Amino acid sequence: MLHITNGDSVVALFEEISMPGEYLSWRDILHEGPAPRTETIEEFSDIRARFVADSGWASYEEARAELARRDATLAKSREQDEVVLWFEHNLFDQLQLLQVLDWYYRNPPVPARLSLIHPEGYLGAMPGEVLEGVFPMRKEVHPSQLELGHRAWQAFTSADPRDMEAVLGASNAPLPYLRMNFERFFEEYPSVRNGLSRSEEQILRALAAGQRTPEEIFQAFCEYEEPMFMGDSSVYSRLERLASEPAAARENDGYELTELGARLLRGEADWIRERGGIDVWLGGVHLQGADAAWRWDGERKRLAGGAGQ
């Protein structure tokens, strides 16, 4: 038996309670950095390893070796009697789940039994005895879940965000948390109102409310999110970017808004135009140039074409 889950904290709980089987942690923050469509998981992992190295989280060689071990374990999993997928209801986990479901869909046969544990809660925060109680409640993955996972992953990795909108327009019943998480991901696109993503605006609002340390800002950020999906490293990287030149939205030597930051919150300025352009990956979409090709219209809850659309 192989258990595939979202991170090391859950694996530590498995070890604590001696959960039968082997464990595989799916270590990849897929809502960060480039996630373009590729023919194979090996090609995709190479792109992700370069992103990890560019972010300073590990060397390319270390990241690539770890992802290679993960991918090899996944490939061998078809020989297991059972593979159990443990993924939470938030964006971080749901993107990982989509990648795994897509891989099984495109690389048959699936294991003799492929099961899913899909709680509306945080696995890493559950006591070991609760995990033991949840385990017998696992359900076999239905072909409709494999098919939707494949379509949703292909949409997420597409260079055209309208493919994700098309998935939202179809039935998401086999994966009940898909809609809310795709909608949350769209909110990471720059806003038509001020060029900020939802996460960037939440950080500025925390500063405006008087939060003055990274830890306080992260805690305030968490209060805006339900479910919470972003770790402190992701929030802190955005906090640093908001202080970078040109056109900083927070003071570089402290945790206070600049005059521009205050204007952005009032909707009186546009961060992309103030900074002279954008260079951001959102799944398979690379927003770059003088303006974003796509923005998010929060009032209408839809994508709006920017430059060239």
Image (tube, grey):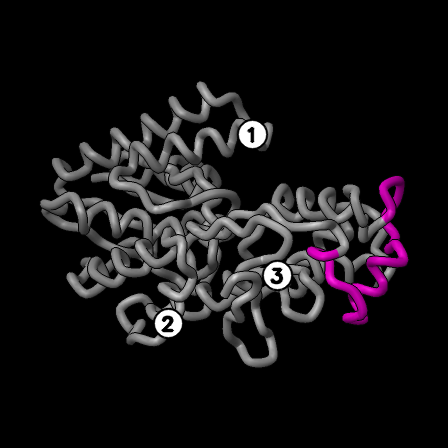
Residue 68 painted magenta: no
Residue 258 painted magenta: yes
Q: In this image, 34 relative to 250: left or right?
A: left
What residue did someone put label 1 on? 54
The N terminus lies in quadrant: top left
What residue did someone put label 3 on? 190
Helix, strand or loop at label 2? It is helix
Q: Name the residue rendered at 64%, 52% in the picture.
A: 290
| CB atoms of marks 2 and 1 within 8 Å | no
Residue 131 appears in the picture as rendered: no
Amino acid on which the number 3 mark rests in the picture: Pro
Helix, strand or loop at label 1? It is helix
Q: Quadrant of residue 204?
A: bottom right
Helix, strand or loop at label 3? It is loop
Q: Quadrant of residue 26?
A: top left
In the image, 44 versus 74, the foreground residue is 44
Residue 83 appears in the picture as rendered: yes
In the image, the segment drawn in magenta is: 251-273
In the image, 285 versus 107, the foreground residue is 285
Residue 160 position, x and y percent, is 40, 59
Q: Nearer the viewer, mark 1 or mark 3?
A: 3
Q: Which mark is residue 168?
A: 2
Residue 223 position, x and y percent, is 67, 63
Amino acid on which the number 2 mark rests in the picture: Leu
